[in-house]
């Protein structure tokens, strides 16, 4: 799993209204949009891309993808495929699915 995965996942989340609250040495801390009824202080922690290629990074990315697929009722494997693409591939892919997934590249 590449470092692009977390960048693509964050782009998707930002398009859905999530905000990057802060960056730590290990994580990007994402705050949910107001339309998500979550407990106060709820945040999602995305592993920093500098850990790409490690088992913990992959586990975190798959868990975040699973959470988003459930939250937005989107196919898990479709999201893995989407987040795994390079920028040129995403631009082409965006022409077909961009509106459905609210992804802007």
Image (cartoon, grey):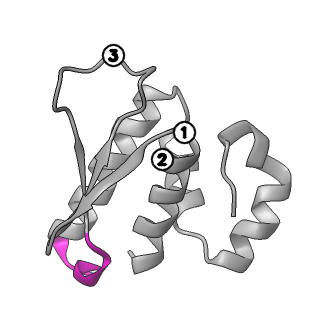
Q: Tell me if 1 is positioned left or right of 25 in this view.
A: right
In this rendering, is residue 79 above or below 75? below
Residue 13 circle label: 2
Region in magenta: 48-55
> Where residue 53 is drawn, which disc sits there?
none
Q: In the rendered structure, does residue 52 fall within the stretch colored magenta?
A: yes
The answer to whether mark 1 and mark 2 are in CB contact below 8 A is yes
- Where disc 2 sits, the SS reads helix
For the residues labelled 1 and 2, the Cα–Cα distance comes to 5 Å
The percent position of residue 45, horizontal first and vertical second, equals 22, 52
Q: Which residue is mark 1?
A: 16
Classify 10 Å Cα crowding around label 2: few (below 14), some (14-19), many (20 and above). many
- Location of mark 3 (residue): 37
Tell me, yes or no, if residue 30 can be seen here. Answer: yes
**Where does the image place residue 70, in percent across and percent down from the top left?**
41, 28
Q: Is residue 77 magenta?
A: no
Q: Please state, as top left, top right, bottom left or bottom right, where the C terminus lies in the image.
A: bottom right
Compute the Cα span from label 1 to label 3: 14 Å
Identify the element where label 1 is drawn: loop
N-terminal-most mark, 1 or 3: 1
């Amino acid at each position: 799993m590449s470092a692009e995965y977390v960048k693509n996942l964050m782009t998707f989340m930002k398009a859905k209204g999530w905000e990057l609250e802060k960056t730590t040495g290990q994580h990007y801390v994402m705050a949910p949009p107001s339309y998500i009824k979550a407990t106060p202080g709820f945040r999602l922690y995305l592993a920093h891309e500098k850990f790409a290629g490690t088992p913990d990074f992959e586990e975190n990315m798959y868990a975040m993808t699973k959470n988003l697929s459930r939250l937005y009722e989107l196919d898990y494997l479709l999201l893995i495929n989407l987040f795994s693409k390079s920028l040129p591939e995403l631009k082409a892919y965006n022409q077909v699915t961009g509106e459905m997934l609210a992804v802007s590249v």
